[in-house]
């Protein structure tokens, strides 16, 4: 996984990576799936969320406990160097009482055996070495404890959108080399009529190719990546009239790096989404780890929008 790219994403302060409600967290059916899971926990429950990111599920757990007048011991781990208290708006208040553990892998957790009443993960388990992670989850769960995970569905609209966005990134970064052509033009040290004309022609060709691709991309429900790229080019071309060439060149590099980072995150997403066959394998791995009452269901959001699989596990 491109861990550094996810760390950059989390530092941006977003709580979730999928559909978000007004407060930035999960809402509607996604939230309901977690509230229902948490509704069976005892008053003094201990909860562990793996791959917690910026704490979306621990936040729901905290709210569920408060709604019942309970005081739960809630923890979140992530392999990334997360800090939701710092990075999320009003984080100190929102996450008060929740303990986050950065740089901790689900495959090797620093908790004693039978520590937690429940283990959770939202778009997390599928990113791990699942046999090792499931064995660890079984270890830290109390006998009689339950685990619930929502994992990416290979046929979800989110994965389809990610594939479209990756194709757009490929057009910008590889096929047209838009940012490289822009960088060449704005940083030319020896400006001659011929060299400037050639660089300008190359850039115009790249821009034209992207503009021609936009209608089809929008028809497929995309186009945002291409719009962002064209907007960046326009602004950076304008900046070269006021700023030194080297400075503008660095800004071009930054814009390209941002898009490449987005593409790596999208690659992670598409690569780890789970098909029917992968879910069969995941359930077999859970059984091998010792779990029983294994159940999977398609997870929908806002009606008929397929967003993932719901996986339920029980430690006997």
Image (tube, rainbow, N blue to C red):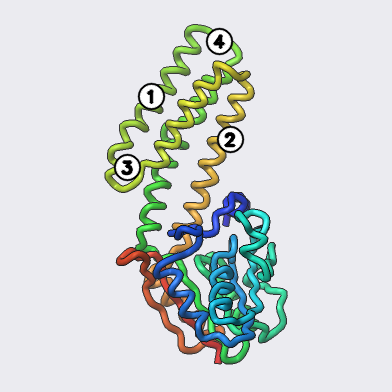
Residue at the top extreme of this rendering: 193
Question: Which picture quadrant has residue 14?
Answer: bottom right
Query: Helix or strand or loop: what does disc 2 sit on?
Result: helix
Name the residue: 59% across, 26% down.
Answer: 249
Residue 165 horizontal/vertical position (percent): 41, 47
Q: CA distance from mark 1 to mark 2?
A: 22 Å
Q: Is residue 41 above or below residue 258?
A: below
Q: Mark 2: few, some, or many residues within 10 Å (few <14, many ≥20)?
A: few
Query: Helix or strand or loop: what does disc 1 sit on?
Result: helix
Nearer-N-terminus badge (4/3) = 4
Point out the frontmost of discs 2 and 4. Answer: 2
Point out the frontmost of discs 3 and 1. Answer: 3
Q: Is residue 190 above or below residue 21?
A: above
Point out the frontmost of discs 4 and 3. Answer: 3
Name the residue: 50% across, 62% down.
Answer: 25
Q: CA distance from mark 3 to mark 1?
A: 18 Å
Report the residue marked by disc 4: 191
Report the residue marked by disc 1: 205
Residue 136 horizontal/vertical position (percent): 63, 78
Report the residue marked by disc 3: 217
């Amino acid at each position: 996984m491109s861990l550094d790219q996810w760390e950059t994403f989390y530092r941006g302060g977003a709580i979730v990576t999928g559909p978000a409600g007004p407060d930035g967290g999960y809402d509607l059916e996604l939230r309901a799936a977690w509230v229902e899971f948490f509704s069976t926990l005892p008053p003094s429950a201990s909860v562990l969320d793996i791959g917690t990111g910026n704490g979306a599920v621990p936040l729901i757990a905290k709210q569920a406990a408060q709604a019942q007048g309970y005081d739960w011991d809630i923890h979140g781990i992530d392999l990334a160097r997360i800090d939701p208290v710092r990075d999320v708006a009003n984080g100190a208040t929102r996450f008060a009482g929740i303990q986050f553990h950065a740089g901790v892998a689900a495959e090797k957790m620093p908790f004693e055996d039978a520590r937690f009443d429940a283990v959770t993960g939202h778009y997390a388990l599928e990113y791990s070495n699942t046999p090792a992670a499931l064995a660890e989850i079984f270890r830290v769960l109390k006998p009689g404890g339950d685990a619930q995970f929502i994992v990416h569905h290979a046929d979800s609209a989110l994965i389809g959108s990610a594939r479209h966005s990756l194709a757009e990134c490929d057009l910008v970064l590889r096929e047209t080399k838009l940012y490289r052509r822009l960088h060449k033009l704005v940083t030319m040290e020896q400006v001659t009529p011929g060299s400037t004309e050639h660089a300008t022609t190359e850039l115009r060709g790249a821009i034209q190719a992207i503009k021609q691709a936009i209608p089809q991309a929008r028809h497929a429900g995309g186009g945002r990546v291409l719009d962002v790229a064209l907007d960046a080019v326009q602004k950076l071309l304008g900046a070269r009239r006021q700023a030194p060439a080297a400075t503008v060149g660095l800004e071009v590099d930054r814009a390209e790096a941002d898009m490449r980072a987005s593409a790596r995150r999208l690659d992670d997403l598409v690569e780890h989404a789970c098909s029917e066959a992968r879910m069969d394998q995941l359930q077999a791995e859970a059984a091998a780890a010792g779990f029983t009452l294994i159940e999977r269901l398609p997870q929908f959001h806002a009606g008929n929008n397929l967003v993932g699989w719901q996986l339920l596990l029980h430690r006997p």
